[in-house]
Amino acid sequence: MKEFPTDFIWGSATSSYQIEGAAEEDGKGPSIWDAFSHIPGRVKNNEHGDVACDHYHRMEEDVQMMKALGLHAYRFSISWPRILPDGTTKQINQAGIDFYNRLINELLANGIEPWITLYHWDLPLALEMEKDGWLNKDIADSFADYARVCFQYFGDRVKNWITINEPWVISMLGYGQGIFAPGRVSNSEPYLAGHHIILAHAKAAAVYREEFAHQGGKIGITNNCDWREPLTDSELDQAAAQRALEFYLAWFTDPIYKGSYPQVMVDRLGDRLPTFTAEEKLLVQGSSDFFGLNHYTTMLASDANGEILEGNVYGNGGISEDQDVNLHVDPTWKKTEMGWAIVPWGCQKLLEWIHHRYDGPNIVITENGGAFPDEMKDGVVDDQDRLAYVKGYLGACHDAMENGVQLKGYMLWSLMDNFEWASGYAKRFGIHYVDFETLKRTPKASALWYREVIRRNGLKV
Ligand code: GAL
């Protein structure tokens, strides 16, 4: 058995827009995802999160589902426009505050530690329409004001805060490739949006530390990153893989752990990459109490030398050209339904890369999991492929920990099938099956297995 430390945190994660529904209820304002998902053609089958898993009305039942799993921690996000309908503190929506209070109290009453993400992509639409969202530097203050409201109302009971989920996705997919809200396509906006995301995180963390230290909690940011394995052991390919990791993860984590952007980004992006003032550097550096990591897959990296090959995962131009790396997947690797390669050793290598680059920070995996073509047969979903995926990745986590990596917790994505952004409801990531007609939840084989892993605090090998 691969045993985990006794204080290891076993969790599962969701996000507001993906599960809550109740999009226009009880005074909630619209978000950019409400608007984006209703533009024809942006989401598979024109699906949207109006109802999603209806978690807003089924919260108590969902907490019982978590309790049955034996979860130590539940990571969920607050919908910013549910508590501040136009994004500003002009109006605080009491019904929204009440909903999250009930959820937090219900979790604590059932022995589950709440881990709150303040921003999981559902930006108040008013901030996008009137202020250009993440492209406007003012957003850092708007976000800090919103965060303050959350600390004020919930911080007496909530001790684990994640400011922002996946800056890379917000920047690259929202402003670079345009496949996520707000759907913009540009090769400079991602770096501007990313810069403001870092400042927003840092300002919110400063508010927490300066005004709410007495609450005694922790605050950090969650970044996502795949592993980049050099295609060959040539120096050029090794440098390409390193560069790709720097353009992905270090873009956001170097400023926070080292005070500045990776030099390779500064050199290659020129004035498309904004700069931090001396004062901002101080604000940003050291602004995360833990290293939140979402990890799913691995790609092979080779030096492009100005020639982006057909089939490069990120297409021509944009990020591919900026980092000058060709990325593809080994055809022999097994893939999830998202087409993401299943490579547990990539997870171990990434954890060790983080450990060495940032002097052994406390890491929490805040997402890992997979979409598979689940089928309900006679009331049972026997998702052996998902179970094997999680088992493989957890094994890799354990191996990394044996090599010194300070991994403190693991949160499986996701607690239940939900609205998978541009893929709609077709891609199922849950360990609980959701019938989107009846909204009934059913534990899959992976849920029953994960319950045993948590109970044993270890993996049978
Ligand atoms: C992450 C995201 C989640 C979830 C997951 C699976 O990027 O934070 O919301 O959708 O990917 O695609």
Image (spheres, rainbow, N blue to C red):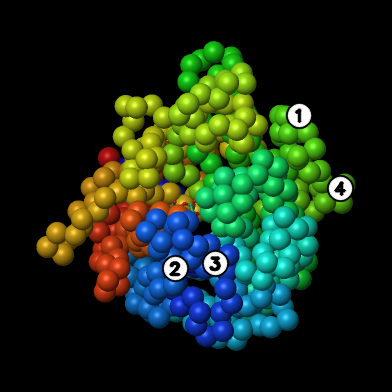
Q: Judge whether residue 101 can be spotted in this image.
A: no
In the displayed structure, does residue 251 sit left or right of residue 66?
A: right
Q: Residue furthest left?
A: 378
Which SS class for mark 4? Answer: loop
- Identify residue type, mark 4: Thr
Which SS class for mark 3? Answer: helix
Question: Is ligand 1 within 8 Å of the beta carbon of the residue shown at mark 3?
Answer: no
- Identify residue type, mark 2: Gly
Which SS class for mark 1? Answer: helix
Q: Which residue is mark 4?
A: 277
In the displayed structure, does residue 378 sit left or right of residue 270?
A: left
Q: Residues within 10 Å of mark 1 (few under 14, many from 20)?
A: few
Looking at the image, which is closer to me, 332 or 279? 332
Task: Locate the N terminus and report the quarter of the image it occupies.
Answer: top left
In this rendering, the label closer to the viewer, 3 or 1: 3
The residue positioned 57% from the left and 69% from the top of the image is: 31
In the displayed structure, does residue 253 sit left or right of residue 429?
A: right
- Identify residue type, mark 3: Ala
In this rendering, the label closer to the viewer, 4 or 3: 3
First-in-chain label (2 vs 3):
3
Distance between the alpha carbons at the discs numbered 2 and 4: 39 Å
Q: Which residue is mark 3?
A: 35
